Image (cartoon, rainbow, N blue to C red):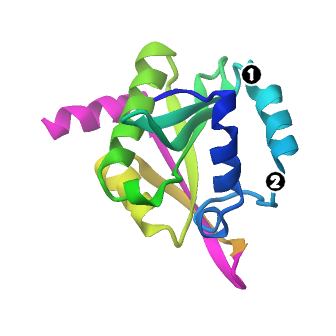
Amino acid sequence: MRPLERQDLPLLQEWANDQGLVNLLGGWHFPVSSDEHGRWFDANVDDFLNRRFGIEVDGQLIGTANLVSINWKDRNAFHGMMIGDTTFRSRGIGPDVVNTIMKFAFLELGLNRLDGTMIGSNAPSIKMYTEKCGWEIEGTKPEWFFRDGNWHDLVIVGITKRRYFEFQENKK
C-alpha cells in the first residue's frame, strides 16, 4: 500500500465511472470528470481525518483502501476498500490489504475500532471480512441501496482492537 498520487487520477476516474464496479460499492455514484477528480484529490491530499491509499502489485495500482472519518478522541474510523482491476480479484489480495489496514490502524495509529459497510449483494466481500479477517456483522439496514432497479441491504461490519488480536491468535 502507498499514498495516492496525482498520476493515479486517470485510473481512479476510470474506476469511478465503471458502472459494474460502482454497483458493488456503497455510496452515491455519479459520473465524474477529470476536473472534478482533480479537485477531490486536492481537497483530500492533506486531510488527516480521511486517509486514502493505493493498493499496488508489482508497481501497478490495482485498487484503493481507506481510513476515513477518523475520530482521534474515541479512537475509531471507517474503512473501505475496492479492487478496481478485475484481474486481481479473488487472488487473496483483499485479506492482505484488510490485515495491513488493521495492523496500521491498531498498532501504529492507536485506534481501537474500525467500522465498514457493504452492499448486501456483495457476498464475496462480506465473506472476506467476516471469515478471513475477523470482522463481525453488527447489523443490516434493509433496502438501503438502489442498484439496477433493485433494492439491496446495507450490511454493517466492525472489528475492535481486542477482536483483532483474538482473531490473529486463533489463526496460529
In the picture of the structure, the residue carrying the numbered disc 1 is 47
Q: Position of residue 104 (x, y in %)?
A: 44, 22
Q: Do the CB atoms of the residues marked 1 and 2 lie less than 8 Å apart?
A: no
The label on residue 114 is none
Q: Please identify the quarter of the rendering in which residue 161 is found.
A: top left
Q: Quadrant of the C terminus?
A: top left
The CA distance from mark 1 to mark 2 is 21 Å
* Near-viewer residue (84 or 137): 84
Kindly report which numbered mark, 1 or 2, lies closer to the viewer in this rendering. Answer: 2
The amino acid type found where label 1 is placed reads Asp
| Mark 1 Cα-neighbour bin, 10 Å: few <14, some 14–19, many ≥20 | few
Q: Quadrant of the N terminus?
A: top left
Q: Position of residue 106 (x, y in %)?
A: 44, 22
Q: Residue at x 81, y 27 (%)?
A: 42
Q: Left or right? Give the position of 113 relative to 130.
A: right
Tell me, yes or no, if residue 75 can be seen here. yes
Q: Residue at x 40, y 64 (%)?
A: 124
**Secondary element at image label 2:** loop
Q: Position of residue 78 (x, y in %)?
A: 61, 38
Q: Position of residue 59 (x, y in %)?
A: 42, 33
Q: Please identify the quarter of the rendering in which residue 169 is found.
A: top left
Q: Residue at x 48, y 24 (%)?
A: 105
Q: How many marks?
A: 2
Q: Outermost residue toward the left?
A: 172
- Counting residues from the start of the chain, the first of labels 1 and 2 encountered is 2
Queried whether the magenta region covers residue 3, the answer comes back as no
Q: Which residues are magenta?
A: 147-172
**Secondary element at image label 1:** loop
Q: Residue at x 39, y 47 (%)?
A: 94
In the picture of the structure, the residue carrying the numbered disc 2 is 32
The amino acid type found where label 2 is placed reads Val
* Near-viewer residue (159 or 39): 39
